[in-house]
Image (cartoon, grey):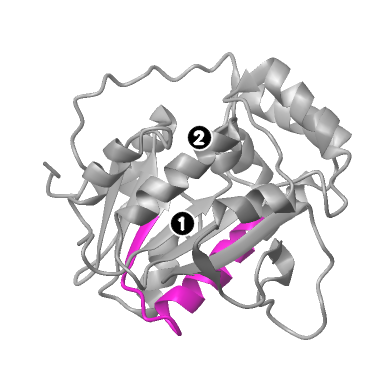
């Protein structure tokens, strides 16, 4: 059961924090300018960025896509429940902050299995009444555990915005990624949404190939890119919200003009 701060319990053994191997959540935190990382993460981040200089822009672009999509979901779409899978380390403009700024009653369940994220969960769960946030200690590869944990905080009979931002790239098999999306979306009702972002070798991302190979040789968890067609397959059966599947900066951008593309597909789609 959740304690008084909203952090759910788990019987799964807590993995130790390994400070000798770079980890995605901490490297991403470093690229975003955070402080929750170790020397090994900064070294890996710098070496990967040297091979693919646009990565810092990709990290920032992904965060801005989260902000714009949550604003749309909590505002125009009227969603009041969010399931954020693969949340990563706490940072500014997290899902609950953006959603509750628009609708204070919004409920958010964060899901991650990184032990460092769990350490910082109390900072992440700084939600005030009438809204609520919770942390689910589960792996994206186990959607049953994800859904069971989310049900502590969310009413899965009412519409939910499922957020899968930069997480399905750690599911290496296409069939497994499709299975996870289908299972999670099957558990939420019509009127729910899926927000998804995914790195690609398209959209100018060809140099990302060597960077991914370097990462997979030296860090954890292993990752991969997907084509636009492969990402679109993950959205089968859902209705894309305009402008559809696009480079993340081009999904309902703020301001005038069309932003430059970056090698990160993004979409928001509604369950019929």
Q: Residue at x 64, y 60 (%)?
A: 266
Give the position of the C terminus as an image quadrant: bottom left
Name the disc covering residue 176, or none. 2
Q: Is residue 153 magenta?
A: no
- Categorize mark 1 by other alpha carbons within 10 Å: few (<14), some (14-19), many (20+): many
Q: Is residue 73 left or right of residue 150?
A: right
- Categorize mark 2 by other alpha carbons within 10 Å: few (<14), some (14-19), many (20+): few
Give the magenta range: 62-83
SS at badge 1 = strand
Please, is residue 138 above or below residue 263 in the view? above
**Closest to the observer: 167 or 125?**
167
Q: Quadrant of residue 42?
A: top right
**Closest to the observer: 53 or 81?**
81
Please, is residue 51 above or below residue 40 in the view? below
Give coordinates of residue 49: x percent, y percent: 81, 37
Name the disc covering residue 163, or none. 1
């Amino acid at each position: 059961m959740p304690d008084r701060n909203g952090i759910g319990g788990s019987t799964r053994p807590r993995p130790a924090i390994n400070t000798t191997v770079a980890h995605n959540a901490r490297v991403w935190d470093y690229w975003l300018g955070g402080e929750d990382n170790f020397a090994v993460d900064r070294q890996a981040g710098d070496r990967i960025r040297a091979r693919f200089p646009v990565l810092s822009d990709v990290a920032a672009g992904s965060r801005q896509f989260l902000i714009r999509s949550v604003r749309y979901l909590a505002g125009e779409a009227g969603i009041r429940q969010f399931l954020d899978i693969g949340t990563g380390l706490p940072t500014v403009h997290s899902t609950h902050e953006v959603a509750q700024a628009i609708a204070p009653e919004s409920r958010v369940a964060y899901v991650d299995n990184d032990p460092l994220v769990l350490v910082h969960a109390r900072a992440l769960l700084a939600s005030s009444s009438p809204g609520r946030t919770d942390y689910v200690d589960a792996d994206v590869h186990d959607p049953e555990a994800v859904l069971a944990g989310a049900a502590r905080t969310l009413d899965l009979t009412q519409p939910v915005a499922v957020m899968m931002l930069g997480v399905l790239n750690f599911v290496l098999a296409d069939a497994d990624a499709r299975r996870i999306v289908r299972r999670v979306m099957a558990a939420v009702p019509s009127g729910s949404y899926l927000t998804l972002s995914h790195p690609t070798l398209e959209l100018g991302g060809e140099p990302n190939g060597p960077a991914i190979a370097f990462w997979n040789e030296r860090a954890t968890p292993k990752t991969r890119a997907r084509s636009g067609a492969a990402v679109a397959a993950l959205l089968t059966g859902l209705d894309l919200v305009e402008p559809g599947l696009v480079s993340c900066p081009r999904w309902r951008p703020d301001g005038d003009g069309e932003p430059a593309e970056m090698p990160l597909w993004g979409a928001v789609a509604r369950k019929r």
